[in-house]
Image: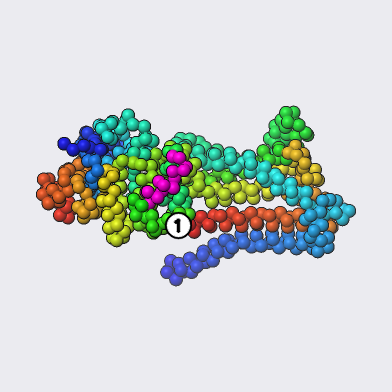
Amino acid sequence: MSSKTAVLKERIIKQVLTVFAFSSILFLFLIFAFILVEGLPLFYKAGVNSIIFGMKWAPTKGFFGIFPMIVSSFLVTFGALIIGAPLGLGCAVYLAEYAGKRQKMFLKPALELLAGIPSVVYGFLGVLYIVPFIRNFVGGSGFSLLATSIVLGVMILPTVISISYDALMSVPRSYREGALAMGSTKWQTTWRVVIPSGKSGILASCILGMGRAVGETMAVIMVAGNALKIPGSVLDPLRTLTSNIALELSYASGDHRMGLFSTGVVLLSIIMVLNYFANVVIRRKVIK
Amino acid sequence: MMDCALKTEKLNLFYGTFHGLKNVDFCVYRNAITSLIGPSGCGKSTLLRCFNRMNDIIDDVSVNGSVLVNNRPLEEIDIIELRKKVGMVFQRPNPFPFSVRENLVYGLKVHGYKRSDYDDIMERCLRAVGLWDDIKDKMNTPALSLSEEMKQRLCVARVLTVEPEIILLDEPCSALDPIATMKIEELMIELKRFYTILIVTHNMQQAARVSDYTGFMLLGDLIEFGETPKIFTAPQDERTDGYITGRFG
């Protein structure tokens, strides 16, 4: 092969790869465009306030209020965080600071597997075990904020663990040595030096976990009960933004359909804000 | 015979199967500066880290022979107590990524000092390392924003807060420029009045300038140990002579 054709071939390969790389941005753009095109007109028609702060969702009768769902989405997200963050951080700390080679060899693939389990399986287990457990031993129907938080809490574990693990591993060894050399115990070193040093990454892991929880749909539909109101207690059922779309899209048309896309617009905005904050805290760490 | 603050007898250390320290008999005299010199990989840092058991955190290290701290065998001393008594300053300044104050109170918190004593102790330690005037109004600035020299001084101050008797310095100036190095050397001589100092250095001139006693190590052996002027002007071993005159190393 002459050098000229070799150069040409290199150039073509580079161009093709560039197109592939930028196609992801194209998809992102298309998703945005479709959701905005379908969802925004209703905001003009029904009014931003009556959608975002409206309490009543009866799309076939002209009520598009999704406030209860926004609140519910936030509630399950924080519920998931309350359960998933301490557990995940604990696991990450164990992995980064305490686990030997053998434990790591066992735990890390287990975590990857946990991340790979389809969400419908989580929902299924939630319906079979968590919902009845809550119904029998705590109260209510079992389909509840509590059940959803538990299921989501477990689902965000892989995200929380892997990102906070990376954050802890990137804490320089010299900090640990400095702390140990002053006579700190392993736990004092971990708690007072390593975790505070990795806190921006840990925070980012929680924010990304929140993003995962906000966006989760299938498992939530299965255990949340899907009632159209703001839950008054952790035992009350609720409906999140994602469930709303998934539950109704199959039979919605006209304004109803647009209402679901408006739900999508709100959801997309929340996720963008979360991602933005995750990036800010990660970048803050890099600059330091 | 003068009193040894730190002492080893027939000390052997292995990294896996690698023989890192070979039958080392060594002594660090009280209230003096002792330096360890030798080419990279000769075991001088390893020897230094035996005295505060920092080799423990490395996998696959085994030690035999005896190490005495204040004439007590190392095994009899609680590791927390040992590391409080035998402070260590590292090659690269390693302040924690917190404020200056947080760095200084760290050891105090860990060792349960009274909160009401914090300010006095911090002031005393910052004065001891000559940072007080520069830093007293910047106690809340991040320690990582200080200059390298100030960071290293802060690390020394941090060690002093928990009242050590012995300070181990592992190439404390290798990340510093010559002027900062000079200042840290002056600091060491200041500290000698109250503390026993063991310093590992790459820099032979530094050993000659600051230390009272010098040990020369090569491939895990302590080749020669004695008063600094003697080591540098009339070494007994030809390998020491070869190293200090720059024929190898």
Is residue B165 shown in magenta? no
Q: Inspect this view and state whether residue A232 appears.
A: yes
The type of residue carrying mark 1 is Lys
* Residue drawn where x is 35% and y is 42% of the image: B163
Closer-to-camera residue (B72/A258):
B72
Residue B114 inside the magenta-drawn segment: yes
Residue for point 61% across, 47% down? A209
Image coordinates for residue B93, horizontal then vertical, percent: 37, 52
The extreme right residue here reads: A61
The chain to which mark 1 is attached is B
Secondary structure mostly seen in magenta is: helix
Q: Nearer the viewer, residue A205 or B121?
A: B121
Query: Which corner quadrant of the image does residue A151 belong to?
Result: top right
Q: Position of residue A288 (x, y in %)?
A: 48, 57
Can residue A113 be seen here? The reply is no
Where A238 sits versus B132, above or below?
above
x 22%, y 49%: residue: B211
Element marked by disc 1: loop
Is B115 located above or below residue B180 in the figure?
Answer: above
Which residue is denoted by mark 1 in the rendering? B138
Residue at position x 81%, y 64% from top?
A44
Crowding near the residue tagged with mark 1, few <14, some 14–19, many ≥20 C-alpha atoms within 10 Å: some
In the rendered structure, the answer to whether residue A51 lies left or right of residue B241 reads: right
Span shown in magenta: B113-126
Tell me residue A133's x, y (percent). Answer: 71, 30
Question: Where is residue A124 shown, x and y percent of the image?
Answer: 70, 37
- Residue B58 falls in image quadrant: top left
